[in-house]
Amino acid sequence: MKKLSILFVIFFSVSLLGQSNELISNVKHQFWGQVQYVNSETTGDVQTFQMKRFRIGAKGDMLKNLKFAFLFEMANNPFLLQGWLDYVIRPEVNIRIGMFKYPFGIENYTSATVWDLINPSYVSSGITYKLGSEGGKLRDIGLQASGKFSLGEKAGLTYYAMLMNGNGINTKDNNKQKDIVGRVKFNFDKMLQIGASYFTGTTDVPNTTTQVNENAFGVDVIFNSKIANRRLKVQGEYITATYEVVGGEVKPGGFYAHALYCLIPATLEAVVRYDSYSNDTNTDLKKNRTTLGVAYYLAKKQRISANYELISDDYNVNTGNLFTLQFQYALQ
């Protein structure tokens, strides 16, 4: 209860400063949550309601060219999910310091409020989510440089380069090495985006003197168009990694591809995805899944989504299909 009280004091203090002090301006509150009903067709079926996410935060401007943001996760034990300061030198050079999402891939780098499907792909969960450590959760503490370059009237290039601890949320490093994450993406006329990501780092194995060298690489593409004035989106990503462990190498990898079509403008969308992943591509074991989904929008980010996942899992033959119904509310 004490932690919860402190979070609300911080939240409302920033709100008041944003309204009464020129030091902090243009404060935007972030408040959103996702409530789910899940039916898992495994051995011993599970049907449950759950609070998937419940987050509050704020972002705004401090002085000239200095921006801030913080976000707390409240769904379970409250904790700081991310908090950072940006110094915008110019459009081509932006410096960020703090705890934030590391720039790898496209699916998990975007906010969960705009995901096309409820659950991320297997390859994003298996590799991207865990970069640096099992506790990565897509975020780490470090320093990042990023920027945008115009390549003409309709084309542009964006880059990110981050130096981070590699131990996950609000955790100190446990060795002298820092992990490096980089990403570059090219876009043309908001229709086509092509990106590539790279990660390299070293992680200490707890309670041992062993270190694991990790490298990961990914490519992604997004295509947006309209058919009969209705949005069509196609997105895909391929990610592979190499973990150098005692006795050899482990090479997880996989891909996903999904297509989204707007059935009723700004109201109803349908999406289908196929994804495949292997914990080690040196073996023949895989997890494959086909996901069918629909989303009904009450407002821009207020929606009800339903996903049905048809799953084939060589690692756990008892894994059955999964149905998830999610209600999302978001003020950002």
Image: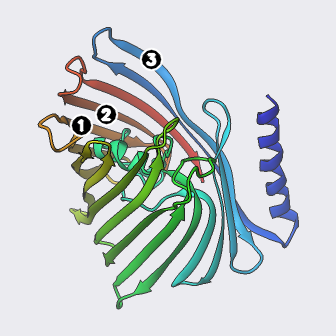
Dot label at residue 307: 2
User: Badge 1 local density, few (<14 within 10 Å), some, or many (20+)?
Assistant: some
Query: How far apart in space, not on screen, are marks 2 and 1 (Cα)?
Result: 6 Å
Query: How far apart in space, not on screen, are marks 2 and 3 (Cα)?
Result: 15 Å
Secondary structure beneath dot 2 equals: strand
Q: Position of residue 66 (x, y in %)?
A: 70, 74
Identify which residue is drawn at 25% across, 45% down.
Answer: 248
Sequence-first disc among 1 and 3: 3
Q: Give the residue at mark 1.
A: 292
Vertical placement of 244 versus 306: above or below? below
Q: Give the residue at mark 3.
A: 48
**Is the C terminus in the top left, top right, bottom left or bottom right quadrant?**
bottom right
Q: Amino acid at mark 2?
A: Asn
Between label 1 and label 3, give the one nearer the viewer.
3
Vertical placement of 309 versus 64: above or below? above
Secondary structure beneath dot 3 equals: strand
> Quick check: 179 left or right of 191?
right
Residue sitting nearer the eye, 332 or 4: 4
> Quick check: 102 left or right of 66?
left
Sequence-first disc among 2 and 1: 1
User: Badge 3 local density, few (<14 within 10 Å), some, or many (20+)?
Assistant: few
Identify which residue is drawn at 50% across, 67% down.
Answer: 162
Q: Pointers 2 and 1 in contact (CB under 8 A)?
A: yes
Residue sitting nearer the eye, 296 or 193: 193
